[in-house]
Amino acid sequence: MKKAPVVVLDNGAFTVKLGLSNASKDVSHCRVIPNAIIRSKGDKTTYFGQDFAECRDFSSLNYRLPFEKGYVVDWDAQKAIWDGIFTEETLGVDTTETSLLITEPYFNLPNLQEVYDQFVFEEYEFQAYHRATPASLIPYGQLFGKPSQVQPECMIVVDSGFSFTHIVPIMEGEIVWSAVKRIDVGGKLLTNHLKELVSFRQWNMMDETYIMNSVKETCCYVTTQFSADLQTCRYKTKDNPILQEYILPDFSLNKQGRVMQPDEMTLESDQILHMGNERFSVPEILFRPDDIGLHQAGLAESIAASIALLPDDLQGMFWANIGLIGGNTKFPGFATRLLSDLRPLAPVECEVVVYESKDAVLEAYRGAVSLAKQSGFANHVVTREEYLEGGSNACRRKFKDWRTAQSSHKEDAARPKASMVREEERAATPAAKVKQPVKTRTRTVSAVKRST
Amino acid sequence: MHVDADRESVLRERCRAASFQLRPLSSLYTTIRPDKLGSYAAQTPSAYVFHPRCTVHVLSLLGAAARQTQAVSALDSEVIAKRTKRHLDELERSNYAEPSSSYLGMEEEEETAGKSAKGRARQTISDRRSLSGAGAKRKKSTMNIRSAVLYKKNLATLIDESGIASLPSHLSTYLTAETGPPREPARMLCSVCGYWGSYRCKKCAMPYCDMNCQGVHDETRCERRIV
Ligand SMILES: [Zn+2]
Ligand SMILES: [Zn+2]
């Protein structure tokens, strides 16, 4: 008999990533669905999650989101969206006959975890389920190299999503919760900030979240030379290569928004949004939250602070294995900038390597699918019977999360087992060699690597 | 709404001076008086708004000028911190016009069904979806599910109720995981154009880069309440 597939759901605050563990070899089958109930004035229709694919008029959309600051607070909305997802039409399987692997936010609240358990077993009646944070699934994926290659014993996963950005150190597959850091900057804040800048300087886009999110995704980039780019944007059109002219959409005419091409003529009716220093000063907030008055360290400093909390003799390995996931890491220039900010913060003798994903949004999903496929997955789940017997306690005992974390002091943080090789030895082993970045003559190597 | 021609020309002139582009009133996207943005909205009584797709509404003109007379030199840092906090909260909104969001979709149903809002008050959006035929037909939900769906709590309440504040100190939680403060002092960026800010407004401490941006700031964004 063929093993039943596992339903995999990376339940993000902006989108849910959904599929079956046996669907295809890669993650191309994955469905990305807005985790929102969206009202379109133009269409005079309310769309629930997946139905949003039918939306045609994206002007002045009104959003109802299950998540607030990264945690599910509106269960009514979440249920409405899940009700559409957890059906046989959508999934191709009956929830009562399958298992589920679902992601939850970092440091999910115990009272919210109970509601996850209740929905999974009482409402959708899955046979069994596993609940995990996105970063904890990365060691099963390919961010740091093909599955055939040795995964690093120590890694930092930077997860920059819709609600916030987390720096998550992982040692031997387990999150070191005492060293996890959170920056309260995510894609939602960036889009809203861009909306404000543009509305103050040009057009009133305060109600145009959808459009401005598209503009952000199309035009914004991370600069490695903030000051110089700022200077460039002082000049008017002709002398400013950074400036982009974005033609705003007119959905009533079925015209989508887009960046104007160099020698393109505009129509009289076209409305142009000028994207100058907005292009890089918006993502800049991830690196300098205090640019908008948020008194928090930026990404590089937070990573350094996280690594400083890890065992001294292993810190070099963390510096050499920094992986990026989440939508914000897709901004062009993100990895390069992070690397250039990190280099001066790392000890001179350390190599600093940043691993990019080619699809940062699906990276946790990819890891989840490969975990679900493993024969050992059965050991990770809580079954419906166990839940009916022990309630949420059964889940609490089974799922490793921040509450099961070991003591937080770096002196007695759990060390990797003897099998772990030291950094110098690792470089000599053939498996690790494949992943070594291009070396220069000095030992201080820094590189950005992109997963294939 | 009728707009006095003189007043409109004054407005247009002022906007031009402030380097705002005024498009024909039929444009899809229109300009907004920046002091109507979020937390800045409540601050300044003189407000004119250019509504999308329609006419110019003049709410009141230059009323603030009389109110911003004497300047106080000492700035209340607490007031500025509050302003920043309010602004950061605004950046977390799902919709700019927030209040309607919790009743999302209700209008349409009420219009078509012709039922009173009162009779539908307890009906949840998830119920409405399943009644409309979308999603799976389900058995009755358990008490746990019903109360999760019916009684929405905001994050602050949930954190309170979670008890994470009183967990043993060796456990990291949402409350302890926030990254530390930045090592370097904040940069000064012009609150108008985004370029380096060289000066701060004597009245509200917002930075600007040159006299041009100062003019725009004074006209639009200056928070006179701090004065
Ligand atoms: Zn300026
Ligand atoms: Zn001022």
Image (cartoon, coloured by chain):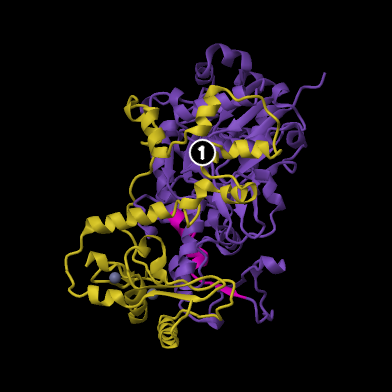
In the rendered image, the vertical position of residue A252 relative to residue A374, given as above or below: below
Chain letter for mark 1, please.
Answer: A
What amino acid is at disc 1? Asp
Residue B118 in magenta stretch: no
Disc 1 element: loop
At 37% from the left and 60% from the top, the residue drawn is B39
Residue B218: x and y in percent read 32, 76
Residue A74: x and y in percent read 51, 38
Count of marks, rendered view: 1
Q: Colour of chain B?
A: yellow
Query: Which residue matches tag 1?
Result: A74
At 65% from the left and 27% from the top, the residue drawn is A100
Depth check: A146 or A292 in front?
A292
Q: Quadrant of residue A389?
A: top right
The purple chain is: A
- What segment is highlighted magenta in the picture? A271-287
Tell me the quarter of the image containing the N terminus of chain A. top right
Depth check: B8 or B23 in front?
B8
> Which quarter of the frame holds ligand 2?
bottom left
Q: Is residue A146 visible from the viewing direction of this image?
A: no
Q: Quadrant of residue B67?
A: bottom left
State left or right for residue A162 relative to residue A260: left
Depth check: A339 or B124 in front?
B124
Residue at the top extreme of this rendering? A389
Q: Is residue A223 visible from the viewing direction of this image?
A: yes
Residue B177: x and y in percent read 39, 38
Q: Residues within 10 Å of mark 1 (few under 14, many from 20)?
A: many
**Mark 1 vs ligand 2: CB below 8 Å:** no
Residue A285 in magenta stretch: yes
Residue A326: x and y in percent read 57, 46
State left or right for residue B111 relative to residue A53: left
